[in-house]
Amino acid sequence: MVLATQLGRGGHETQLSLSRALVALGEPMVAALLPARTAADPAVRAHALATERLLRDPETGFGFAIEEAKRVVALGGSGQEGH
């Protein structure tokens, strides 16, 4: 999925728009996020985790989801702990 290759790029609004587009695709987009979850770039990993969080919990604000994902990435986590 080409959209998933754009993760981590742009500012807040661009990332929010991309996440919304991916979430609108529903559960099938999760597989497209797998390469981004292991990318060398921490911004790409965080954006993928935040997007997955929005899919699981649409009521979560993007700002909260991206900050939470950045913390997980900084701590070396995958975001799947406890799942």
Image (cartoon, rainbow, N blue to C red):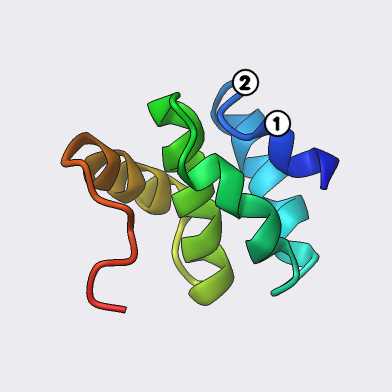
In this view, 56 is above or below 5? below
Residue at the left extreme of this rendering: 75
Disc number at residue 80? none
Label 1 sits on a secondary structure element that is helix
Which residue is rendered at x = 36% and y = 51% of the image? 64
Residue at the bottom extreme of this rendering: 83
Which residue is rendered at x = 54% and y = 30% of the image? 12
Residue closest to the eye, 10 or 34: 34
Q: Position of residue 77 (x, y in %)?
A: 24, 50
Quadrant the C terminus occupies: bottom left
Which residue is rendered at x = 16% and y = 41% of the image? 75
Dot 1 alpha-carbon crowd within 10 angstroms: few under 14, some 14 to 19, many 20 or more: some
Residue closest to the eye, 32 or 25: 32
Which residue is rendered at x = 62% and y = 52% of the image? 33
Disc 2 residue type? Gly
Closest to the camera, between mark 2 and mark 1, is 1
Label 2 sits on a secondary structure element that is loop
Q: Is residue 50 visible?
A: yes
Q: Position of residue 70 (x, y in %)?
A: 31, 39
Dot 2 alpha-carbon crowd within 10 angstroms: few under 14, some 14 to 19, many 20 or more: few
In this view, 43 is above or below 31? above
For label 2, the residue is 10
Disc 1 residue type? Gln
For label 1, the residue is 6
